[in-house]
Image (cartoon, grey):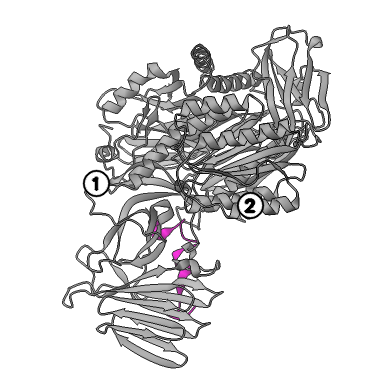
Amino acid sequence: MSGLQGVGLLLLWGSACLWLPGLARGALVISGGHEALQETRGAAKSLQKRSTDEATVEVYSVKVDCTVTSRFAHTVMTSRALNKANSSQEIFFEVDLPKTAFIVNFSMEIDGKVYVGEVKEKEKAKKQYEKAVSSGQTAGLVKASGRKMEKFSVSVNIAAESNVTFILTYEELLQRKLGQYEILTRVKPKQPVQEFQIVANIYEPQGISYVDAHATFLSNELLPLVEKTVSDNKAHISFSPTMEQQRKCPGCDGTLIDGDFVIKYDVKRANSLGDVQIVNGYFVHFFAPPDLPRVPKNVVFVIDRSGSMSGKKMEQTREAMLTILLELHEEDHFALIQFDQRIEHWRESLTKATKEMVAEGMAYVRKIFDSGVTDINGAVLRAVDMLVKDRQEKKLPERSVDMIILLTDGMPNSGVSNLETIQENVQSAIGGNMSLFCLGFGNDVDYSFLDLMSKQNKGVARRIFEGSDAVLQLQGFYQEVASPLLSEVDLRYPDNAVDSLTTNHYTQLYNGSEIVVAGRLTDNDLNNFMVEVFGQGFEQDFTVQGQVSALDWDVMYPNEEYIFGDFTERLWAYLTIQQLLEKSKSGAADEKANATAKALDMSLHYSFVTPLTSMVVTKPDTEDGPDSPLVADKLTEEQRQQAERMLHRYAHAPPMNAPPMYYHQATPTYFVDGDPHFMIELPDREDALCFNINDKPGTIFNLVRDPTQGILVNGQIIGDKKIAPDGKVNTYFCRFGIVHRTLGVRLEVSTQDISVLQDGKLVKLLWSDTASVKGLNVDLLLTKDRSLTVTLKDSVKFVILLHKVWAKHPYHRDYLGFYTLDSHLLSPSVHGLLGQFYHGIGYEVSDLRPGKVPEKPDATMYVKGQELNVTRGWQRDFRRDVKNGENVPCWFVHSNGTGLIDGDATDYVVSGLFKTV
């Protein structure tokens, strides 16, 4: 941005946070037809460095105000800041909002003048977007942010001694899943704020059964600050810590407030008809009757075993399937199909889920291994044939539900491979007689293909993200559809009293979910408003009917200043637009066009930012004249996936001007080498994580500790001979102590020699030797002036490298590197700076953006419940070339690995080379 002076600051909250000078960054731009990553290196070069005293900008207020009225959530996020400097400064505002929400308003107030975002048709906003992009600016305001969220961000130049207020408003209909509603607010202020407040008011005339509020960052000290007041039909939740209560420590600038604030609740369900709300000419009907018996299900699991499922994916699929099979009810029937280019089934037909049959099915699942290519068409059709055949032969209960659950991670590349042909074949074979659920594992799958195929066949698609919790994702999806309660549910209303109904026929109602229907009233005579619901239950048809009347909100909430009186209309509009967007993806061309046109018209009328509209933000003029407008778009799931693919491709490509890269071996490697650089290589993800640990020379760190096996590895760091002219103090590992108490082995390795003590016998070796020593419990292989390989009996293997430096070098000394091989042989209780990663680490990386150095972009990492700023770079692996090393690309975690390692780096300091404390 031209003409800017001073510091770049970010107000992120909801995420509300300050963007300090070292965090200036660009953005991943996804908009309409522009599903592309803006040229990261070019954007990075265009960033200007800004330096000033960050205290000259005061962020003095961050507020989140959420009002939920009959499941419809209206959230306002407000942040205020003052530029106390005598020059203009650029302030950034970022908010994370749920991906299911629609932005409805954004405004900036600067010294009394208000700048309001305007919702426009996407195609009309496109020209302004392209102008901003072509001028070298980052024009996209919305980016994907993890699995559930989207990040809205904007920056503005603020004059000296000026105030700025940012206000973002969004709305969404809360969906009931597994028996509860969830309100998720992400808060990341980055520093203590004078006025910090989260407030939620929940109005549920149906009655509130329970409310729970928690946060990922709540400590024992902060927990009592969450205030919760619950009456029969209203709940009030607030969280407002003082500045001192927000601080990580007395007097320091760090804040404890960093993560997700989550409210979960459910409503009372005494009425089998459900709950009907009528307000201002619109009605909404919530239907989830209590105490219905579950309907038996007949489910065919179709599992992709192609080569791309190898490694962790296949392992996690097997693990999830074993748990899912155990959760089958004895009245259920099930079948198992595995496929690559060949299609194999466990049994010819479905089997009743008795304990014996489930055990046999689990044994079959354990033997599923990856190989070959993918024939989705043949596999799904085989599943359909099994269900049809068993139905015809009356092997399945008459009152039961048929479903297919497909799990795949790739594109069909065997048999029929044309996506439209597969969809036509499957839809024709199913004929509306069963549900198809598609689970797309990872980023290589064509999600839009699976999504449409599911919707064509009474099902839904779900993305399964690669990560350590993939098993939980698979199990969670299954639990949502595991217990059908009703099928072919019809919700009927007087024809002469309503129009513009949302979908009022549903194939299934599952336990823990809820059906929502909304419409517009054409007859104000509510004495005539009869509601009827029909469905097929377990033993008999379900029928219920009743007369409904408008609720007097002033009577139910007499002391409330009720300001959300049009919620039924906006809920109806939200639900209608969502359903029209789904219809625009399938059907005849004219039907899709009509659905698109109507969704666009309603999005504009109600000022919703949807995939068809954009919010154009006009910014104040800068010193160089008018500034380019920015554009906020709504991301589709396909666009989110595209962004992740681009991030993945960029992350695994060598940075520009970087030395040649060394890519990972088949097994994970964990090492520390250099100054001191810790590296976790993860070949199953084709990725690596890295961090440095800096401390004073002489400090001893615990690297590996396995109390089960009695293994301990500590390392001591050494500094340079003297401080270099640039003032940097370099430290390296100079000694390692290795103990295997169970085997009676103790090694001390320094840059001069190696001492081995076993069974009371001491052996000493020099690095100038070449030797092979074989003992009862330990083998040593010493390569002269290069490496020592330590193999512990029936256990792990360590490699220690010697880095020799010219003896007369004015600053540097000889140092050691430490590498762990066969780490899987250690017990699950292993820990330490390296050991804690030996059994895997789950993380996600998103929001790729320019960093300080063009060839080293920054990104956001979600790991261990935290959100970290990481930088793409590389570290050297010296195993093949001890002199020069080979570069390994990795995500660098700053600040001594804070957020990645458990606790703080100082927690790993020990008092001696063979001590545990």
Q: Is residue 71 magenta?
A: no
Q: Secondary structure at mark 1?
A: loop
Q: Nearer the viewer, mark 2 or mark 1?
A: 2
Residue 913 lies in the magenta stretch: yes
**View extreme (left): residue:** 808
Q: Which residue is mark 1?
A: 656
Indicate the position of residue 526 as horizontal and vertical percent values.
78, 11
Q: Earlier in the sequence, mark 2 or mark 1?
A: 2
Residue 81 horizontal/vertical position (percent): 43, 37
Q: CA distance from mark 2 to mark 1?
A: 45 Å
Contact (Cβ within 8 Å) of mark 2 with mark 1: no
Residue range highlighted in magenta: 895-917
Q: Is residue 337 left or right of residue 543?
A: left
Residue at 61% across / 32% down in the picture? 436
Marks counted in the figure total 2
Look at the image and tell me whether residue 346 can be seen: yes
Q: Residue at x 48, y 74 (%)?
A: 795
User: What SS does tag 2 mark?
Assistant: helix
Position in image of residue 288 (x %, y %) = 74, 30
Judging by the rendered image, the residue that carries numbered circle 2 is: 322
Q: In the rendered image of this protein, does residue 434 appear above or below residue 696?
A: above
Horizontal side of 263 relative to 705 (left or right) equals: right
585 relative to 305, above or below: above
Name which residue type carries label 1. Met
